[in-house]
């Protein structure tokens, strides 16, 4: 995680600790666990097979002007020297748009054919 994210989480936990009543220690632990679980699930990465090549896809939350956006990245190390990227408001859309970006670049550099691109994008 980025340094700013960790710092923000630490500050949030300290503030929660100061303002929650002391008798609610069990509630504090349950609330902290729920928040940390929810936050950790926001970052996602996966490996998949793209036309016979091992590729990776990831999505990361980012905040810009107090709005939540999702950065997506799709790349195939060892096959393509570029990556597809995106920034959307949709969590699932970020991976989809990054894949479209990658497929467009691969098509432009003639690593795949138009038929392969159409099959992958429609599927």
Image (tube, rainbow, N blue to C red):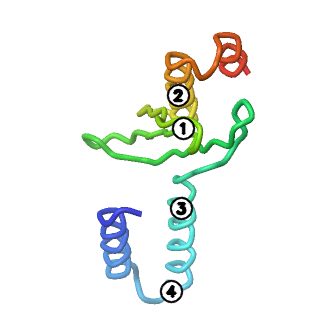
In the image, is 8 to the left or to the right of 121? left
Residue 3 is labelled as: none
Dot 3 or dot 1, earlier in sequence = 3
Dot 4 or dot 3, earlier in sequence = 4
Dot 2 or dot 4, earlier in sequence = 4
Which quarter of the rendered picture does the C terminus lie within?
top right
The percent position of residue 56, horizontal first and vertical second, equals 60, 44
Give the residue at mark 3.
40
Give the residue furthest to the left: 65
Give the residue at mark 1.
74
Are the residues at dot 2 and dot 3 in contact (C-beta closer than 8 Å)?
no
Are the residues at dot 2 and dot 1 in contact (C-beta closer than 8 Å)?
yes
Cα distance in 3D space between marks 2 and 1: 6 Å
Cα distance in 3D space between marks 2 and 3: 26 Å
Are the residues at dot 3 and dot 1 in contact (C-beta closer than 8 Å)?
no
Within-10-Å neighbours for mark 1: few <14, some 14–19, many 20+: many
Q: What residue do we see at 69% from left, 22% from top?
A: 120
Give the residue at mark 2.
102
- The mark closer to the camera, 4 or 3, is 3
Within-10-Å neighbours for mark 4: few <14, some 14–19, many 20+: few
- The mark closer to the camera, 3 or 1, is 1
Q: What residue do we see at 50% from left, 86% from top?
A: 25
Does 12 sit above or below residue 75? below
The percent position of residue 55, horizontal first and vertical second, equals 63, 42
Give the residue furthest to the top: 114
Give the residue at mark 4.
25
Cα distance in 3D space between marks 2 and 4: 49 Å
The percent position of residue 89, horizontal first and vertical second, equals 44, 33
- The mark closer to the camera, 2 or 4, is 2
Dot 2 or dot 1, earlier in sequence = 1
């Amino acid at each position: 995680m980025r340094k700013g994210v960790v710092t923000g989480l630490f500050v949030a936990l300290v503030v929660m600790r100061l303002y929650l009543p002391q008798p609610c220690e069990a509630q504090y632990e349950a609330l902290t666990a729920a928040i940390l679980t929810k936050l950790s699930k926001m970052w996602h990465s996966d490996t998949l097979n793209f036309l016979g090549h091992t590729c990776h896809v990831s999505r990361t939350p980012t905040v810009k002007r107090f709005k939540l956006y999702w950065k997506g990245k799709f790349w195939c190390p060892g096959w393509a020297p570029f990556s597809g990227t995106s920034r959307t408001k949709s969590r699932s859309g970020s991976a989809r748009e990054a894949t479209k970006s990658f497929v467009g670049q691969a098509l432009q550099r003639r690593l795949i054919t138009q038929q392969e691109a159409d099959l992958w994008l429609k599927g």
